[in-house]
């Protein structure tokens, strides 16, 4: 679905984000959790943004979304600057067009470990020559990424968000 269709799920996406990122290893602050709606709107403003959802009985069980990478790495935010500083020039070349940026992959905690996340991610990236995402190295999904052929290419911390992350590329 495109960005407009995803925006129709904004309330459910915010609920799901809280469920997924309030707990360890993310342990996001109330302020960061509350700011997801603003970040979601910014994400969906990226050209070509879209995603895939799993809905059961009107309830959002999982989502993956992102956008086509630009010609250069983004800069100007603590996250973008930390990412750019952490990757080698060779890795940086793989994070730009024609790659796909996977911004979020979330599955309702009550429905995890049932293959939903794997199916969402596989479906979303299948037509792209390359894709990348950033996750916490201790996130439960990190093992699934490795099983699916994603490789950790860098590790960095975004201190303003107290978030540790790894860049994974397929």
Image (cartoon, rainbow, N blue to C red):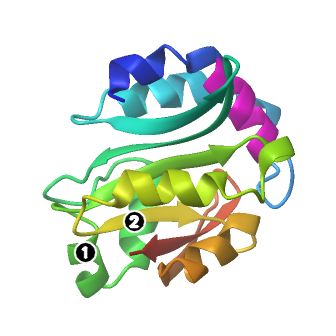
Compared to residue 126, the image places residue 166 above or below, namely below
Residue 94 tag number? 1
Q: Residue at x 64, y 45 (%)?
A: 106
Q: Position of residue 102 (x, y in %)?
A: 43, 53
Task: Report the Cα–Cα distance between label 1 and label 2.
Answer: 8 Å
Q: Of label 1 and label 2, which has the lower sequence position?
A: 1
Q: Are marks 1 and 2 in contact (CB under 8 Å)?
A: yes
Picture mark count: 2
Q: Residue at x 73, y 25 (%)?
A: 15
Question: In terms of secondary structure, where does tag 1 sit?
Answer: helix
Q: Position of residue 66 (x, y in %)?
A: 39, 44
Q: Which residues are magenta?
A: 12-21
Would residue 14 be found to the left or right of residue 50 on screen?
A: right
Per the image, the residue denoted by label 2 is 132
Would residue 22 be found to the left or right of residue 81 on screen?
A: right
Q: As rendered, which of 167 and 79 lies closer to the eye? A: 167
Q: Residue furthest left?
A: 71
Q: Position of residue 138 (x, y in %)?
A: 75, 72
Q: Residue at x 81, y 61 (%)?
A: 25
Compared to residue 105, the image places residue 154 above or below, namely below
């Amino acid at each position: 679905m495109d960005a407009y269709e995803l925006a129709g799920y904004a309330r459910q996406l915010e609920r799901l984000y809280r469920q997924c990122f309030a707990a360890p290893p993310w342990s996001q602050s109330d302020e960061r959790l509350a700011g997801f709606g603003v970040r979601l709107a910014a994400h969906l403003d990226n050209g070509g943004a879209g995603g895939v959802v799993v809905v059961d009985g009107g309830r959002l069980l999982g989502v993956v979304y992102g956008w086509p990478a630009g010609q250069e790495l983004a800069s100007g935010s603590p996250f973008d600057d930390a990412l750019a500083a952490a990757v080698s020039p060779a890795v940086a070349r793989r994070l730009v067009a024609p790659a796909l940026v996977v911004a979020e992959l979330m599955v309702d905690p009550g429905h995890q470990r049932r293959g939903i996340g794997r199916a969402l991610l596989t479906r979303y990236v299948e037509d792209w020559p390359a894709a990348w995402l950033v996750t916490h190295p201790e996130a439960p999904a990190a093992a699934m990424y490795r099983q699916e052929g994603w490789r950790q290419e860098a590790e960095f911390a975004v201190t303003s968000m107290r978030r540790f992350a790894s860049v994974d590329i397929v």
